Image (cartoon, rainbow, N blue to C red):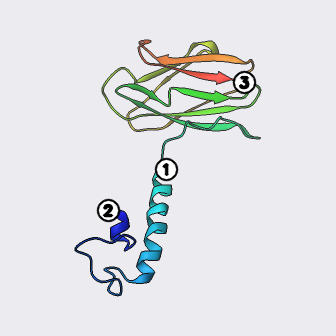
Amino acid sequence: MLAMLLGYAPHPFSPAPEESPLPSPVRIALPFVLLGILCLALACTEEPPPPASGGEGARVAIAVGADGYEPARVEAQAGEPLTLVFTRTTDEGCGDQLVIAAHDIRRDLPLNEPVEVTFTPTEAGELRFSCGMDMYDGAIVVR
């Protein structure tokens, strides 16, 4: 069907070869346009969040919604400062408080206000964070 649209295959109802339904430049450009659209669609697929790293530490934004934390897992480097920026986006659920027990951190999360939590993980492993009721949870994977 596409070949017929591009004028490459004869069709019983197609005009004579000298009368193509599409001008020659359009027939030439159309496959490239379609390929470009396909490439853009593939480029827009979701990728996992990049690891948190950098010379002055890293910042990771975390949304707190009705279903918990997004992203729920964050990567970090031991010995580098890490700033997590939590923003509660709904009144639903129990996300109004944040707890990182291993670092004795407890913060209230007001609705639609970013709250920065900065600390330096010292050892490789997994640090758990949760809501105040311990129903939502997430993890910081320290390498």
Q: Amino acid at mark 1?
A: Leu
Residue 69 lies, in percent from the top left, at 45, 27
**Furthest-left residue in view?**
13
Identify which residue is drawn at 48% across, 38% down: 114
Residue at label 1? 42
Q: Earlier in the sequence, mark 3 or mark 1?
A: 1
Side of 137 relative to 67 (left or right):
right
Number of labelled discs? Answer: 3
* Nearer to us in this view, 35 or 16: 16
Q: Is residue 33 above or below residue 43?
A: below
Q: Nearer the viewer, mark 3 or mark 1?
A: 1
* Nearer to us in this view, 107 or 42: 42
Q: Quadrant of residue 79?
A: top right
Quadrant in the picture for the C terminus: top right
* Nearer to us in this view, 8 or 105: 8
Q: Quadrant of residue 34?
A: bottom left
Alpha carbons under labels 3 and 1: distance apart: 30 Å
Alpha carbons under labels 2 and 1: distance apart: 24 Å
Q: Amino acid at mark 2?
A: Met
Residue at label 3? 143
Residue 70 lies, in percent from the top left, at 46, 31
Residue 99 lies, in percent from the top left, at 52, 18
Q: Are marks 3 and 1 in contact (CB under 8 Å)?
A: no
Residue at label 2? 1
